[in-house]
């Protein structure tokens, strides 16, 4: 995805990524998961309904993906987990992008703010992402809000660096200088001329943030620092059933498969966006 400038500095045209197998796979998989997550509860069982008599049941007509150690339907639980994982991925990507772009615009365009913002930014980048996420998640009771916050903060510095690098280049571009000479305010220059040109490079980074958030939520939930134990998250499902791995390995593989395919789909979309931006 590339941005082309014309004689009109506000005229921004985008080249959409070409249709390829990877892009079709990525978008198709994410679309199916989104539909299942939104409407799966209409035709599936309650993901938290206990049935001890059916515990660790293999695939059957009543339970297409089997049941877990408490007799809960795994298909219903992984479908509910898809809704949670996609919501976390989109929310983290959105919040990290908004705050990262704002800080990147300020750091790249205003020289006095650049050293302050970037020193703090570099300090946060020096902390391992998962360690920082675990520390932030432990500040309050486990909840979806806390997980999104804990996963968003470590990703903001990466968005800041990408946005700042692009702004430093765009600030010296002819159409930006022309807008400044014509008397446009700094706010108008940033929002009308600079910000639209950040869409192409940031679209790639956003997909990787989304994939990281999906994996991060599963990791936090697996170690007990993420969502509550009664939430059918993919990480919670794997954590709950790891003790039955030797006896009923499908209880772990089902959630792991959905998690792997989802991350691969998001990464495939990101790769295609990267190729079109080159």
Image (cartoon, grey):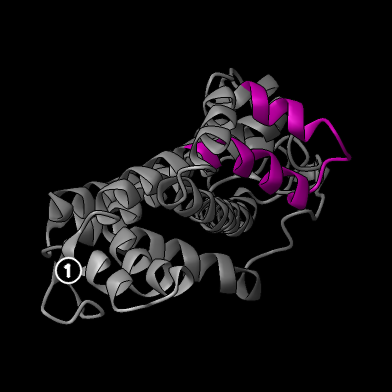
Residue 26 percent location from the top left of the image: 29, 56
Q: Name the side, left or right, on which 232 lies relative to 278.
A: right
Residue 72 percent location from the top left of the image: 72, 48
The image shows a total of numbered marks equal to 1
The one nearer the camera, 173 or 100, is: 173
Q: Is residue 209 visible?
A: yes
Query: Quadrant where the N terminus lies?
Result: bottom left
137 in the magenta segment: yes
- The residue that appears at 53% across and 49% down in the rendered structure is 103
The one nearer the camera, 91 or 119, is: 119
Q: Check disc 1: other Cα within 10 Å, few if <14, some if 14-19, many if 20+.
A: few
Residue stretch in magenta = 131-157
Q: Name the side, left or right, on which 187 lies relative to 270.
A: right
- The residue that appears at 52% across and 42% down in the rendered structure is 112
136 in the magenta segment: yes
Residue 105 percent location from the top left of the image: 45, 54
Q: Residue furthest right?
A: 141
Q: As displayed, is residue 126 above or below residue 8? A: above
Q: Chief secondary structure of the magenta span?
A: helix
Residue 109 percent location from the top left of the image: 42, 52
Q: Which residue is mark 1?
A: 16
- The residue that appears at 21% across and 48% down in the rendered structure is 274
Q: As displayed, is residue 180 above or below residue 76? A: below
Q: Is residue 261 visible?
A: no
Q: Name the side, left or right, on which 109 lies relative to 251.
A: left
Quadrant housing residue 124: top right
The one nearer the camera, 186 or 276, is: 186
Q: Secondary structure at mark 1?
A: loop
Q: Name the side, left or right, on which 188 lies relative to 6.
A: right
């Amino acid at each position: 995805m590339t941005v082309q400038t014309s004689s009109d500095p506000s005229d921004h045209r985008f080249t959409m990524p070409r249709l390829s197998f990877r892009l079709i796979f990525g978008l198709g998989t994410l679309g199916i998961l989104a539909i299942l997550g939104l409407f799966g509860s209409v035709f599936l069982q309650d993901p938290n309904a206990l049935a001890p008599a059916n515990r660790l049941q293999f695939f059957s007509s009543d339970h297409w993906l089997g049941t877990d150690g408490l007799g809960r339907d795994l298909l219903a639980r992984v479908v509910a987990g898809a809704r949670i994982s996609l919501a976390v991925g989109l929310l983290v990507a959105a919040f990290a992008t908004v705050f990262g772009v704002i800080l990147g615009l300020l750091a790249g365009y205003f020289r006095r703010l650049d050293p302050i913002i970037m020193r703090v930014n570099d300090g946060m980048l020096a902390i391992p992402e998962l360690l920082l996420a675990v520390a932030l998640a432990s500040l309050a009771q486990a909840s979806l809000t806390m997980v999104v916050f804990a996963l968003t903060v470590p990703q903001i510095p990466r968005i800041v660096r990408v946005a700042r690098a692009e702004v430093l280049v765009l600030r010296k571009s002819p159409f930006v200088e022309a807008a400044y000479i014509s008397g446009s305010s700094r706010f108008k220059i940033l929002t009308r001329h600079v910000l639209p040109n950040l869409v192409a490079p940031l679209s790639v980074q956003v997909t990787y943030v989304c994939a990281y958030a999906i994996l991060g939520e599963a990791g936090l939930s697996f170690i007990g620092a993420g969502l509550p134990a009664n939430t059918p998250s993919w990480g919670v499902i794997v954590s709950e059933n790891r003790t039955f791995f030797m006896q009923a390995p499908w209880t772990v593989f089902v959630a792991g498969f959905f998690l792997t395919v989802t991350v691969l789909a998001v990464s495939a979309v990101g790769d295609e966006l990267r190729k079109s931006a080159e």
